[in-house]
């Protein structure tokens, strides 16, 4: 397992936001993290990226404990994230945002820049070209010199992914990347995520768009009230009664309705899952050639 | 060149104080560029002025050594001050650093070895215009090369969104402290130059008023690019002198001049909220912006 969480807990005052969560993300997979609002998904992302420290439990990345490291050390190990509420550097251009993402890979010192060191100039050219390639990969290459705050919502979301990719991360944490996107945009995002995994990246995807999660993820963990209530493949999870109850509630009066809904969901899930491999496979070669 | 010599002879103090103020403006620009609203630079200037003056008078150090000596002490003070204080943001940091400035002022007032409330008199006048403007040119070159560097981007990212910068691998504590300490060093250099320019060091010259003046250089000049504080220092240093010539229009020296000075500052802030520098950077860009690709609506 590239990322392993072991009985991680975090409480805010008396409220237990994350309560003994354990799961693992294997190298080269897209792992989904879903759950109703307030289930503790974003808290978990904050814990992994080092912005918060867990009260108990352990988080290991590639066999190393990371739950006591400051965020910049976690980032240096190759974990990058995006934010649910977009947090770009608004006054900087799209390209400059990606350049900040490359921070851990730059080696220039001010003294070298003062005498125009050719080594530093070459490094800057190389990273600049790479930043432009990343912008092309997320479809914002023609907006490279536009201030991030002037980009459209969808472009901002994709720019955040490009900024995270600037460091050549090993694990990418995506916090609701499709929020506010329409169906077409969300499908394009799904193809992008799959193509990134094709290049060897591992992705932890927090998302409310269940369709996207079902299509894109290899494994899914479902959280409710800070606990793991299900963990498995998309097919297993979509048939799990605890998951359905968490999303729809369990009221005895509505038991019949729930049964009915389960049946509907199962057929819906079936229809979603069956064509999923085909949809997942087909665009991949295309997405990769796009990226070149 | 005769007229230049004559111009300098007539206006030497204005010219030199413009240079010093420009250096001070750059010292606060450094911290502002990293998103830190620090008003500690008057205090660091005092440390630089006192230490360099004492090294000259009691230590008999050569001039070229007392300047970095004073600045180094200011920078060394900035490290233990910055570590706790830089956890604060915005106005809270401003208030804490104002407090530091007052502590420095009161320390020197009560330090009899350094002349107490009278300060130090009879410092040899060793600062020449080329010391001031030589340093200013070196600093401008450094600031120019800083743009686009790893450090420059790290500071800009911290200013824009500190939390996001941390998850991008920027060691925000280190870079904030670096900006604070370098700013202290530059302010210390300016203090040393000033002490050796006007013979005296008076503890009350480095109080709250001076701290705010330094901030005003950056605000009036513009904080988006490093030449802004230099322009701001230029306007604020030259304006009172230029207003002297208004006497023929019936404006008297003293309160009237301060009033006109204040009105000009107000106009700049109202109509050029990004500072004087926007006169040079914005106008061409507003033309360019029409060519700029505009993101289609989502």
Image: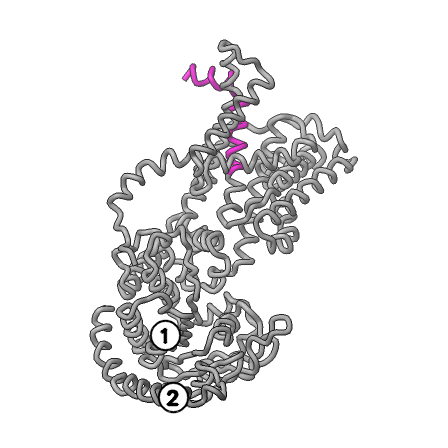
Q: Residue B140's x, y, as percent?
A: 44, 39
Q: Crowding at label 1, few (<14), some or many (≥20) Cα neighbours within 10 Å? A: some
Q: Residue A117's x, y, as percent?
A: 37, 52
Number of marks in picture? 2
Give the residue drawn at x 39%, y 36%. B278
Specify the quadrant that holds the N terminus of chain B: top left
Specify the quadrant that holds the C terminus of chain B: bottom left
Asked if the residue at tag 2 contacts the one at tag 1, i.e. Cβ–Cβ closer than 8 Å, the answer is: no
- Segment tinted magenta in the rendering: B1-25
Residue nearest the viewer, comparing B85 with A108? B85
Discs 1/2, front: 2
Tell me: residue B183, above or below residue A279. above
Q: Is residue B281 magenta?
A: no
Which residue matches tag 2?
A262
Residue furthest to the front: A253
Q: Residue B201's x, y, as percent?
A: 67, 30
Tell me: residue B70, above or below residue A220. above
Q: Is residue B8 magenta?
A: yes
Give the residue drawn at x 45%, y 44%. B143
Which residue matches tag 1?
A209
User: Which sits earlier in the primary sequence, circle 1 or circle 2?
Assistant: 1
Q: Quadrant for residue A270, please give it.
A: bottom left
Q: Quadrant for residue A173, please give it.
A: bottom left
Instruction: Provide the chain ID for the residue under circle 1.
Output: A
Type of colouring: one colour
């Amino acid at each position: 397992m590239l990322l392993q969480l072991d009985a991680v807990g975090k409480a805010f005052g008396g409220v237990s936001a994350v309560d003994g969560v354990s799961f693992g993300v294997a190298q080269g997979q897209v792992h989904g993290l879903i759950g109703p609002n307030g289930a503790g998904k974003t808290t978990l992302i904050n814990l992994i990226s080092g912005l918060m420290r867990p009260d108990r439990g352990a988080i290991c990345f590639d066999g190393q404990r990371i739950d006591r490291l400051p965020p910049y050390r976690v980032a240096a190990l190759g974990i990058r994230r995006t934010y649910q509420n977009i947090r770009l550097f608004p006054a900087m251009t799209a390209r400059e945002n990606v350049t900040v993402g490359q921070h851990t890979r730059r080696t220039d010192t001010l003294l070298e820049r003062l005498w125009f060191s050719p080594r530093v100039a070459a490094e800057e050219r190389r990273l600049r070209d790479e930043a432009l390639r990343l912008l092309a990969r997320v479809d914002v290459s023609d907006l490279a010199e536009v201030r991030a705050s002037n980009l459209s919502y969808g472009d901002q979301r994709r720019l955040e992914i490009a900024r995270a990719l600037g460091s050549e991360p090993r694990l990418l944490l995506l916090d609701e990347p499709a929020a506010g996107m329409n169906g077409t945009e969300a499908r394009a995002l799904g193809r992008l995520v799959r193509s990134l995994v094709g290049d060897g990246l591992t992705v932890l995807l927090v998302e409310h768009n269940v369709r996207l999660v079902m299509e894109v993820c290899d494994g899914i963990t479902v959280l409710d009230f800070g606990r793991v209530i299900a963990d498995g493949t998309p097919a297993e999870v979509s048939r799990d009664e605890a998951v359905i109850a968490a999303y729809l509630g369990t009221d005895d009066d509505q038991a019949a309705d729930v049964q009915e809904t389960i049946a509907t969901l199962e057929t819906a899930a079936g229809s979603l899952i069956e064509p999923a491999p085909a949809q997942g496979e087909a665009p991949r070669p295309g997405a990769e050639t796009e990226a070149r | 060149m005769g007229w230049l010599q004559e111009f300098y002879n007539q206006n030497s103090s204005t010219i030199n104080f413009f240079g010093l103020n420009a250096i001070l403006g750059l010292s606060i620009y450094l911290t502002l560029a990293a998103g830190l609203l620090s008003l500690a630079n008057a205090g660091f200037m005092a440390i630089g002025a006192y230490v360099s003056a004492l090294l000259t008078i009691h230590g008999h150090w050569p001039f070229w050594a007392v300047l970095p000596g004073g600045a180094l002490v200011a920078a060394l003070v900035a490290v233990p001050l910055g570590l706790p204080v830089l956890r604060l943001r915005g106005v809270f940091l401003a208030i804490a650093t104002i407090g530091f400035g007052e502590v420095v002022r009161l320390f020197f007032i009560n330090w009899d070895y350094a002349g107490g409330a009278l300060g130090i008199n009879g410092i040899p006048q060793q600062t020449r215009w080329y010391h001031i403007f030589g340093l200013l040119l070196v600093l401008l070159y450094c600031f120019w090369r800083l743009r686009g560097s790893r450090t420059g981007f790290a500071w800009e990212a911290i200013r824009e969104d500190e939390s996001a910068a941390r998850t991008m691998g920027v060691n925000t504590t280190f870079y904030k402290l670096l900006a604070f300490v370098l700013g202290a060093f530059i302010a210390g250099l300016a203090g040393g130059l000033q002490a050796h320019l006007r013979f005296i060091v008076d503890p009350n010259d480095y109080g709250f008023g001076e701290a705010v003046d330094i901030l005003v250089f950056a605000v009036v000049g513009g904080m988006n690019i490093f030449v802004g504080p230099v322009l701001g220092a230029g306007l604020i240093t030259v304006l009172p002198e230029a207003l002297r010539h208004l006497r023929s229009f019936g404006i008297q020296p003293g309160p009237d001049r301060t009033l006109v000075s204040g009105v000009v500052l107000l106009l700049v802030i109202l109509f050029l909220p990004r500072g004087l520098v926007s006169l040079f950077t914005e106008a061409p860009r507003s033309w360019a912006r029409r060519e700029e690709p505009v993101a289609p609506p989502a």
